[in-house]
Image (spheres, grey):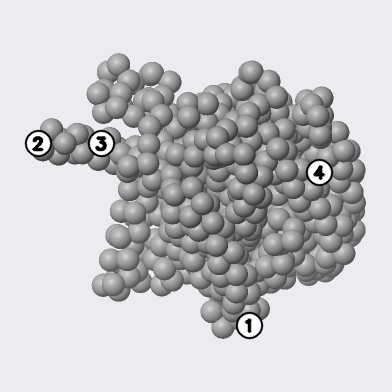
Amino acid sequence: MMADFDAMTTELQRSLTAFLPELVLVTGIVLMLFFRLFNWSHRVHMSNWALGFSLLAGICSLWQWAAFNAYMGTTYPLAESIAQPFEMFSGLLMHDLFTIYFRIFLILFTAMVIWLTRLTGIPDRMDSPDFYTLLFGATLGMMLMASSNHLLMVFISIEMASVPSYVMAGFLKGRRDSSEAAIKYVVYGAGAAGVMLYGISLLTGLFGTAHLPTLAIEVVHTAAHHHSFDAHLTTVTLALLMIFVGIAFKLAAVPFHFWCPDVFEGASTEVAAFLSVASKAAALALLSRLLISVTDAPELETARTWLATGIAAIAAMTATFGNLAAYAQNNLKRLLAYSTIAHAGYMMMPIAAALIMIGQTNDATSGADAIQSMLFYLAVYLFMNLGAFAVIAFIRNEIRSEDLQDYQGLGRSSPVLGISMLIFLFSLTGIPPLAGFFSKFYIFAALFEAGGFNNGMYWLLVVAAVNTVISLFYYVKILRVMILNPPTEANEQVQIPLISPAGIYSLCIAVPVLLLGIWAALYEITPAFAQAIFAQAIAQ
């Protein structure tokens, strides 16, 4: 009895150590709520506190990464205990390099959004505890999405990420379009959650477990020992597709994208920037872990092919619809909303390629290459998409407008913003030598490699290439208005110098977009993160 208690205590301590970045964010949430409770928020803006806690959580995540690389494992026993993959909290969450990558990604991005909100003044001092509490809550849910190892945690983490996002979308008080955005977001989210929960109940009821590794074993066992598995196969595929509805809602993938343009237009630019990157990163992490862990077995080749084809078709529709719809938009936030939809399609393509390649070869690295391209694309997408929204936020503070026709000549009167916007939009298009070119190149290479197998991805590669050309037209439309058109009299007065908070922020975001295209070191360290998810599946 005592031995069981000691083992339980040791396991809990190990799990809490691995859960340290999330605990730091929880501590920040509690302290900011205390500030709000005792009405201390009028004395100090919470952005500095929020930035400090996010950086501390980032340091903890980097420390865990160092432990995995054995830099600290032989010196500090605490680091050694988490220097290898294991299941946290009795299998609810997974601690591995894949989880750590998204922890670092989400925390870094959250810190950059906090810095942006401090510069733009949204939120103000009185509302800052509420806003950053919601921001940390959404980030915490997204971090749990990336590490979910149990269907119960899949649902809880998505809801944890969604509910604070609903409130942030309507955070601009007194604005009808902001309230409308929040209501639409809630309605679509509730519907997607209900469909996803039904899919989870189907899988759990059919196989008697919600633990993903155990579920994978049960699926393989049923496929190997039951002649009537075709009926089960249909149910499994249907259940996974229903779960995909909830994940696709976070991705804003077609046909679950309807909320995205309205929410982005009604929400503040800062919130739209956060949702455009963080939600997609968490959803892609969850989708990758779920599909690879459940279908990674030779017996499930048919189901895997169905799912790969379905995801490829949705990715192609998402990229095509997003790019075509963006061209007709005049509101810049709405235009970038459709742009994020298109990029969600690009980032889903490597998952389809990985599902095709997995099981077709004895080398799991072939499937990991596709996931690696997705991870690199996400890292580049963070900077180029956040940068585009940041420029809009800075200009909005000057001219009080987000309509494209009001941006005439602003790239001339404020060259630092004009040049930064050119870098961000050309990178989003995929023009060399910017980082966006190489991120798309690696995805195209993964699709080309998958095209060599049966039911290959050559057709999806063509769709991706055509969409890249289409996207150039509406990105150039923005640059034409900002840089080629002469400024109006009012816009001539808008001058944001390089040595200013907005100029320095834009420069700090633009430099990584340049460096990641020239210096490929980040891509060289991503294979270990990508292979971690395959190592978990193979270990089953």
The first of marks 4 and 2 along the sequence is 2
Instruction: Determine which residue is flagged by label 1.
Output: 176
Asked if the residue at tag 1 contacts the one at tag 3, i.e. Cβ–Cβ closer than 8 Å, the answer is no
**Mark 4 vs 2: CB contact within 8 A:** no
Image quadrant occupied by the N terminus: top left
Q: Which residue is mark 4?
A: 429
Task: Report the mark closest to the observer, 4 or 3.
Answer: 3
3 or 1: tag closer to the N-terminus: 3
Where 101 falls versus 314 (above or below)?
above
Residue located 76% across and 51% down the image? 314
List the residue tagged with mark 3: 11
Element type at mark 2 = helix
- Residue 392: quadrant of the picture: bottom right
* Gap in angstroms between the C-alphas marked 4 and 3: 47 Å
Residue under the image location 30 percent in, 39 percent down: 15
Residue 395 image point, x, y percent: 69, 62
Q: Amino acid at mark 4?
A: Thr
Observer-nearest of 48 and 158:
158
Residue 65: in sight, yes or no? yes
Residue identifier under label 2 = 2
Q: What x and y, as percent, mark residue 94?
A: 42, 38
Label 2, residues with CA under 10 Å away: few <14, some 14-19, many ≥20: few
Which residue is depicted at the point 85% across and 49% down?
A: 471
Q: Nearer the viewer, residue 355 or 173?
A: 355
Q: Nearer the viewer, mark 2 or mark 1?
A: 2
Is residue 409 shown to the viewer in this render?
no
| Kind of residue at disc 2 | Met
| Alpha carbons under labels 2 and 3: distance apart | 14 Å
Question: Which residue type carries mark 1?
Answer: Arg
Q: Horizontally, is 185 left or right of 468 in the view?
A: left
Q: Nearer the viewer, mark 3 or mark 1?
A: 3
Crowding at label 3, few (<14), some or many (≥20) Cα neighbours within 10 Å? Answer: some
